[in-house]
Image: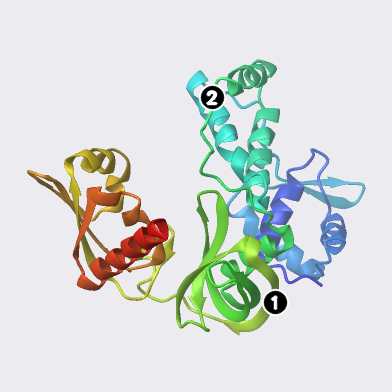
Amino acid sequence: MKDMAQTERQIFILLLLSENKRGYTVNDIHESLKKWDVVVDKKTIMRDIDSLSGICFISEEERNGKTYYTADKFRLRDITFTSCELISLAFLLELLKPYQYMTMGRTSRELIHKLLDNTTNLNREFIKHFSGLVTINTNNYVSDDVNPEIETRLQEAIRDKNKIRIIYHSFGRDEVTIRVIHPYELCINDGALSVVGYCELRNDIRDFRVSRILALTGLDEKFTILPDYFNGKERRKFIHLSGSTVEQIIIAFDKQTSKYILEYEAELADEIVKTDDGITFIRNTAVTDELIRWILQFGHGARVLNPSHLKERICQELKKSLEHYEA
């Protein structure tokens, strides 16, 4: 038997009551829930209907000695969109294309098409015409092979704040580990779906790419989100990777490289100071391999000023590259 939360069950009932004009009896609702392996008594269903009546319009009709319930006002019909809104829907459909490998991505596209199914033929024809006129560069997106069952169970664990045990294949170390994590949220990095949460193995916040989760087991243990997690969470990482020790990173960029930084990478900085020779880039973040790769791509156009150990690491990497070419 599935453990369906009260809110989820009431949404199910509300959607059911809005499906057609004839309505449903309590027995009908009870049987529909049983088909989804959700068993609740009829008194509970009646309480759900009473609760829903307080927030939306539910009608009752007596027919042949039975009471039928409908939620006609909840159903969307004959929606009218402006041209700007239709263009925005076409834009959203294009925006969602790279995410069709995710259950969320597919469901989002189906939701937009469901909205369009309730609109006029003219609007649907407009969307067909305009969809070919909107193109979004998806070069940075990754098409992952995400297991839909794992994605669904992650959503449930995040919703219910349940710990999970995962078997995970680490990309950096190329090893398989078993970890207990507290899943906080799902996020998308360049098209790759990840789950972010506290890892008991590393005693720190970690990102786990969902396609690299080989197996997932739900645990009967609750967790609480660290109180300061959502405060400035994005600034703890540099692009994708995060670390526990945050330091002030200061990099001097020459004039030519500064043009690129100001045009494309300015949002990565906490502060940018213009100088006679270019700019000084300041950011509080952890020193990770990703940060080092980012600095190295600018070659002689970038010079680390702080911290000293990062400067030494960059020098070591440059020496290794030189030795490689001289060999």
Type of amino acid at the residue the image marks with label 1: Thr
Say above or below: 68 vs 88: below
Say above or below: 138 vs 215: above
Q: Position of residue 208 (x, y in %)?
A: 55, 67
Q: Position of residue 198 (x, y in %)?
A: 49, 76
Q: Which mark is residue 309?
A: none
Q: In this rendered view, identify the residue nearer to me: 214 or 317.
A: 317
Q: In this rendered view, identify the residue nearer to me: 295 or 42.
A: 295
Q: Residue at x 73, y 72 (%)?
A: 3
Q: Position of residue 255 (x, y in %)?
A: 17, 41
The answer to which quarter of the image holds residue 134 is top right
The residue to which callout 1 is attached is 217
User: Badge 2, how many Cα within 10 Å: few under 14, some, many 20+?
Assistant: some
Question: Is 80 situated left or right of 229 in this image?
Answer: right
List the single residue furthest toward the right. 64
Q: Residue at x 54, y 27 (%)?
A: 135
Tell me the SS state at disc 1: strand
Q: Residue at x 79, y 39 (%)?
A: 20
List the single residue furthest toward the left. 276
The residue to which callout 2 is attached is 134
Question: Is 162 situated left or right of 266 in this image?
Answer: right
Q: How many marks?
A: 2
Q: Position of residue 183 (x, y in %)?
A: 55, 71
Question: Is 130 situated left or right of 274 in this image?
Answer: right
Q: In this rendered view, identify the residue nearer to me: 237 or 278.
A: 278
